[in-house]
Amino acid sequence: MAYAIKAAIRDPRAETFAFAAQKTMYRGRHVAAGDTIFLFASETEGGQGLVARGVVTAAEAVAGVPGVARQTPRVTVSIRRTALAGRPLGRRELRPLTDWYDGRPGTELNFKLYRQATNKIIGLSDGAAAFLDTFF
């Protein structure tokens, strides 16, 4: 399965990335070493959207806080970059895709990444992963 992470990325050209205790949604908690992951530099933190593709080199679930009933699963991941994006894809390009039930991969990305402004790791459908591959 492929995944995407939206996070603060200071240097998109870095060879490796490490993200501690990242929020997960849409099956993102299942990310594991060897999985393909697409990196989105969060626009709310000065980023530009899709910047790179990589492979997860390590993933570890973060233990929940004792005594808190409802918590979002969090994962710490390390990623090795395998490619840089060749063209832009971010909030501006995905914003018009708001028919949540049209089945288009761009709509899936808009829904999962930008419907809520939080940084997160998400699981992707095969169609969305294939769509993202066209940007490299």
Image (spheres, grey):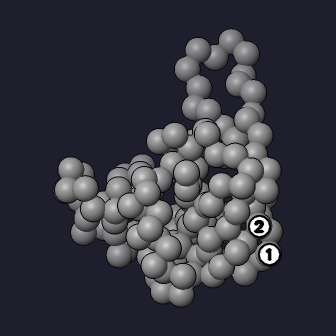
Mark number for residue 114?
none
**Residue in front for this viewpoint, 59 or 13:** 59
User: Residues under labels 1 and 2: Cα distance?
Assistant: 6 Å
Q: Position of residue 101 (x, y in %)?
A: 21, 50
Q: Earlier in the sequence, mark 1 or mark 2?
A: 1
Residue most extreme to the bottom: 86
Residue 74 visible in the shown view: yes
Q: Position of residue 40 (x, y in %)?
A: 56, 67
Amino acid under disc 2: Arg
Q: Is residue 118 left or right of residue 57?
A: left
Q: Residue at x 70, y 41 (%)?
A: 75
Q: Residue at x 51, y 48 (%)?
A: 123
Amino acid under disc 1: Glu
Mark number for residue 80?
2
Q: Locate the C terminus by quadrant.
A: bottom right
Q: Residue at x 61, y 40 (%)?
A: 30
Q: Residue at x 60, y 66 (%)?
A: 39
Q: Which residue is mark 1?
A: 15
